[in-house]
Structure formats: C-alpha cells, structure tokens
Image (cartoon, helix red, strand yellow):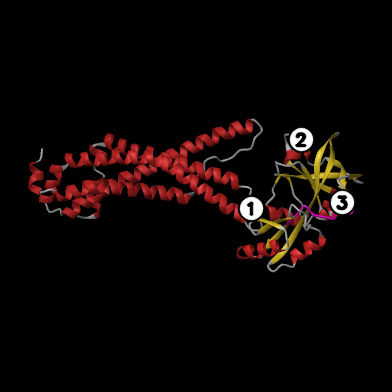
Amino acid sequence: MRVQDIAKLATRAFKTNPTRTWLTILGMGVGTGAVVTLVGLGFGLQNIILEQIVLGDTLLSLNVTPPPARAVTLNPQTVQQLLEIEHVNAVAPFASFAALITYDGLTGNTFLQGANPNYFRFTGTQAVAGRLFTEETITEDRNNVILTQAMLKLFEVEDPESALGKQVSFRVFIPKEGTSDTIESDLKKRYTIVGVSSEESRPGAIVLLDELTSQVAVDEYERVQMRVDAVEYLDQVSSSTLGLGFGVTALSKTVEQANKIFQGIQAVLAVFGGIALVVSAIGMFNTMTVTLLERTAEIGIMRTLGASSQDIKILFISEAIIVGFLGGVVGILIGIGIGFSLNTMLNILATSNGGKAVALFAYPLPFILFIATFSACVGFLTGVFPARRAAALNPLDAIRYK
C-alpha cells in the first residue's frame, strides 16, 4: 500500500466521525496540557530562583570568608596569598563597616561597604537603576556611591530612579582592635548616588574600596571573591584555600544543587500531570478499539482487494499516531495558554502593587518538542493492540461481520 493511500485512509476518520475524533484529540490534549502546565511551572520557578545568576565570571568565582574562630583573617597580606594560588587570576576584596547614612534629610542605619568594579562581575550583582562601578569610570566614581534596594526601602523610596543624582553622607563606626568598642568618624565628603543594586536582604551603601581606605583604616576584609581560570580548577583552588584556614563557597555548586532540586520538583509535577495523561490514553485506546469493531467489514474488503496484514497494522498505527500527535499539539496550546494567562494576571497584580513582573511559567523549546514527540509515542502505544487485532482478522470472517 502506498504512503499516500495510508495517509488518506488514516485521516478518513476526520470526515466520517469528526466529533468523536476531535473529542479523542481533546481528551489527549487535556492530559498533555496538564503535564505541560505543571512542568512549565517547575521551569518557571527554577528560572525565577536562578535568574540573578550571571554565567561566566560568576560561576568561576569562589567566595572566601574568615573562619568563625578568627584564627586567620582576610587582610592585604592574606589576600596576596590567595592571589598567588595556582589557577587564581583575580581577587576582589570586600570591606564593610556599620554606619549611619543621611539621605534627603533622613538618617538611618546601614553598612558602608568598599568594593572594586570586578567584585560586581564576580558576584553577579546587577543594577536595577543607574549603573555599577566600571573600570572605565573608576576615576569619577571616587565621588559616587551605590545603594542597595534594601537601603532605599528603609527610606521608603519606591522608585529607584528617583534616588539617582542625590547626595548622601556617612558616619562610620570603626571597631577598636582587641575591644568591643567603636570609634565614630564622619566621612569628609558627600557622595552622589549613581546606581541601585539588586540586593534586597541587607541595607548597604557601596563606595570604591580605594576611596574607603582613604577615609577609614581597613585592616580586615569581610570577604574576598576569587576568580578561577576554568571550572575544572574550582575544586583544586577550593582545597588550597581551605588549607589556609578560610571558608570557601562556590556559586556553581549552589546552582548545581538547585538544579537537582528543581529536577526533582519537575518530576513530581510531571507525575501528577501524567495521571491525567494516562486517563486520556485509556480513552484513546477505547476509541481505537471501537473503531476496529466499526471497520471490521471494511478491513475484510481491503484484505480481499490485496491489502496485507502488515498494511492493516500500519494503517491503524498511523491513525493512532496522528491522533496522539494532534492531542499533544492541542495539549501544548492549552498548557501555554494557561501559563500565559496566569503570568499576565500575576504580573498585572504584582506591578500594580509595586512589585516586579516575573514569568511563573516557562516552556523551553526542547521540552515542547519532547512533549509533541512523547504524545505521538503514546498514540503509537495505544494503537498497537487494536492494530494487531485488526491485522489478525480473517478476511472472510471480517466481510461477514455485522
């Protein structure tokens, strides 16, 4: 039997029994749509959690902190030791002092922090307004400051753009060595806000590290970011750093663990959606069995006219694959439609209340292609048994069947 004849006969049900055929496709679509919607929710949550991570320098960076017992400290000398570790090509120290900040006539508690431009690259920090420090603007940035989003929230500033260009001043609390006392020191100049960072958990103000050390004696750093040559050297450099007595965390390890967790979440969600898909597949199997009974006489005629049992089997399986594939396409459209609608409603609600728009549902192209292929495979599996029964019918018995 020619391919075009098989295609014509396999799609004949769309003309002879269009209602039943499309209801079968819709049933498959509902089951597939449940899978697409739930797994799309898993992808969306994964993207929301990891969206702040910048590939490249961030994933090649190690965060180095002093041990709780303070047996060793991060100071200019130990930072130089870190830089001399094999496969470390750059370090970015970060200093921090408790301080008071005066903004627009209001005073509040903050942390005055010092960092150089490469620190932002290594940590993946992003600007929600204005800009961050860069190597090209390092000279003019000696008079500038970057505030965190948490800092603006402390002053009840809703629009980060409105803070740009305003000036702030600081009073820093410098710890006395060997005691719990501090010395208060007013910085000698005011700084202009040029950017607002995405940090939302800690109120802070960041100036250039060289600028901070010119105003305050910096004997210790709070942490240091190290950039490694390549991913394969992360474990080696981590071991060398731990050998010096410091604590080390790698963002790449965190990302890897987070991805494993989300893969588990997606698998659980897929199981729940798969239950609906199984129910739909049972309905499709029932439809194919009924179709076999209705077309028994037709099968006998085709066998009498020369169609082989293999042709009959291919015919039924082709019809099942087409129905399964179309059910998958309908399910993808249902799932994406639900996700798009919920994303739109949630984003309208979030932005109207001063929040940030996010994509709660996400549908990567490889996942969509997998669902379409998987649906066709489900159709194939549901059509195998009816196809084998149809192929095994005796032509004479089939012709006499009523």
Q: Where residue 41 appears, x then y in whole percent? A: 50, 41
Residue at the (14%, 43%) spot, across then down: 296
Say which amino acid is labelled 2: Leu
Give the magenta-colored segment's residue range.
214-224
List the residue tagged with mark 2: 154
- Judging depth in this view, the residue of 182 and 32 nearest the camera is 182
Q: Position of residue 382 (x, y in %)?
A: 28, 45
Q: CA distance from mark 1 to mark 3?
A: 39 Å
Figure quadrant of the C terminus: top left
Looking at the image, is 400 positioned above or below residue 3? above
Relative to residue 310, is residue 23 drawn left or right? right
Amino acid bearing label 1:
Val
Q: In terms of sequence position, does the residue under pointer 1 or pointer 3 come before the other?
A: 1
Q: In screen coordinates, is 226 left or right of 3?
A: right
Q: Is residue 261 left or right of residue 398?
A: right
Q: Which residue is mark 3?
A: 178
Magenta segment: does it hold 58?
no
